[in-house]
Every structure is written in C-alpha cells, then in structure tokens.
Image: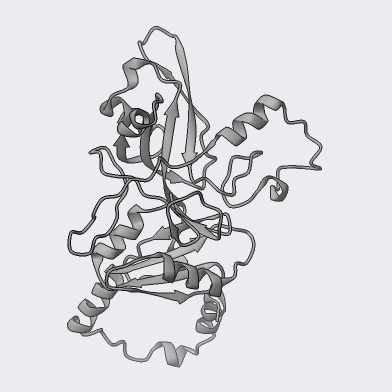
Amino acid sequence: MKSEELAILCSALSIQEKERPVETLDAKLKAKGEHLLSLCLVGKVLSNKLINKEALINVLSNLWRANEGVEIEDLEGNLFACHFKSLEDKKYIQSGGPWTFDRAIIALEEPSGTGEVASMKFNRVEFWVRIHNLPLLCLTEDIGTFLGSMIGEVMDVDLLAAKNIGEKFVRVRVVVDIDEPLKRSLRVDLLGNGVITTMLLRYERLQDFCFKCSMLGHSLRDCPDYGDGKEVITEAQLRLNVWLRSESPPKRFNNRNASAGRRSWGNQSGKPYFSAGQGNWGGEPSGIIQRK
C-alpha cells in the first residue's frame, strides 16, 4: 500500500482511538533498530517510467559482491531498500557509484531518524567529473578542490588519471544536486585580471540526460520543455552534448581487503580504478546496470 493511502487511512481514525495511551519503545529495541538502519541504503531509480523491479533486484544482488551479503527489498514505485550485514560493505557500494539501471541513474540515500522514506529527497548523486581546458596553473589538488566546489560538494580529487592516459584534465568526485541542471562548464578569472577561462566538464558514466534542460531523469524526447521538437540544434551543440559523457579511466585492480581480495577504484592517492558492466567486471557498459 502506498504511503499516501496509509496517511489518508490514519487521518480517518476516531478521536477515541487517537487519545489512547502512547507507549515508548524500549531502549534495547530502539538501539537494535538504529543499528539495522545504519546498515541500510534506500535507492530510487531516477526515471519517469516504472521499472522492472524484479530485474533490478536480481541484477544488483548478483553484481554487488558484498562480503557478508545484502538483502534488497522492493518498495513502492521505483524505490528499493538495501540491507547490508556490515558497514564496510555499505560504504563499499556507496563509493562505487553512480549506479545505473536501464540507462537511468540510481540515487542512494542513507535513512535517518526513524527511516521515513517519504521524507527522503533522492536528489544527491556522486559523479566523477573531468574538468578540461585547464592551463598548467590549475593542475594541482588544491585548485582541483576549488574548481570541484563550483560543481558540488567535493569528495575526492584525482590527478593521476589524466597522466595515465596522456591527457590534461583534473578529475574530481563531487556530490551533484540533481534538482538543478547539470553544469556543462566553469568560468573562472584565474589571475584576477578580468580574463575569463572557460573550462568544459565531462561526467563519467552519465546515462539518461536531457540535452534541452540539462536535467537527469529523462531524455530529450520526454522533456516537458522541448515543445514541438522542431527546435534547431547546431552541430556544435550536438557535439558538446555527446562529449559531455565520458568513460571511466582504464580499470586497474587492487585488493580492497587483503583477506577477501576485493577490488577498489581510484582516488587522489593513486588507488586503482574499477568499472563494471552488466554484471561483468571491466569492459564498457552495454547492459542493464553499471557503475561509474
């Protein structure tokens, strides 16, 4: 039953029922519940279409190699809950995003308080973003952090990826507010002399994305702002829209956990990169689900 329907039913309770004594949850029971909640993630597939939940749960269960296992529970709409057995497994999955299903981004949120799903916004997704068209002045971790903060909350800065593939960019992991249009560029006065440098952005593993309104969650043909679809898109605009998407760096492997032989992905300290596609470790994403 949907939460809206439950709220309507609760409002129909009689005054006599509402005036009955209120019980307080036992401290031990509360502590146990809070512990289980701390190992939970609630996910939402950001699509305006109803997804195949059974397929989602099957693929995630097979793809997420949690050391101690994970149980995935079907919730209403495009929502689902992930119940981990260890905090390490939970953090491992969080750090591997963004995850996608059927070309739509999955937003994962940590429940707080009583874990009321209706109060969750699902408006924050972590992306690795490449910042291009940089002069040599900007190829430092501190400046990378500054530039990344213009996109969102900075979680990590990686200077090695560009060197490994012989290119010039700074790679930052940022929390993007998906209620706002994705930024395509940054404009910075580097020397304070009024000369503006325009830096172009590329989002790794970016999936369904509207070229018209720059919002996640729908494609161009489903955009409410697209009008009759007769607007002219120049060749330069088309190339920019395609270029906005980027692959992850070539995979490299490292043991995340010596006893388990788990794999991890890169950050500023030079730890290896990791990618996945359709349940296979490595390769280009060609299937239902993938991560960054």
Question: Is 174 on the left-hand or right-hand side of 32?
Answer: right
Q: Nearer the viewer, residue 157 or 22?
A: 157
Q: Nearer the viewer, residue 291 or 80?
A: 291
Quarter of the figure with residue 231: top right
Question: Is 227 on the left-hand or right-hand side of 76?
Answer: right
Q: Residue at x 25, y 84 (%)?
A: 25
Q: Residue at x 33, y 45 (%)?
A: 252
Question: Is 274 on the left-hand or right-hand side of 121?
Answer: left
Residue 156 at x, y = what percent? 30, 40
Residue 108 at x, y = what percent? 42, 59
Q: Is residue 76 above or below residue 20?
A: above
Q: Nearer the viewer, residue 235 or 275?
A: 275
Outermost residue on the top side: it is 193
* Quadrant (top left, top right, bottom left, bottom right) of the N terminus: bottom right
Residue 31 at x, y = what percent? 20, 77
Quarter of the figure with residue 137: top left
Chosen colour scheme: one colour
Residue 241 at x, y = what percent? 61, 34
Quarter of the figure with residue 141: top left
Q: Residue at x 29, y 55 (%)?
A: 263
State how many labels appear: 0
Q: Is residue 270 above or below residue 73?
A: above
Q: Nearer the viewer, residue 95 or 118?
A: 95
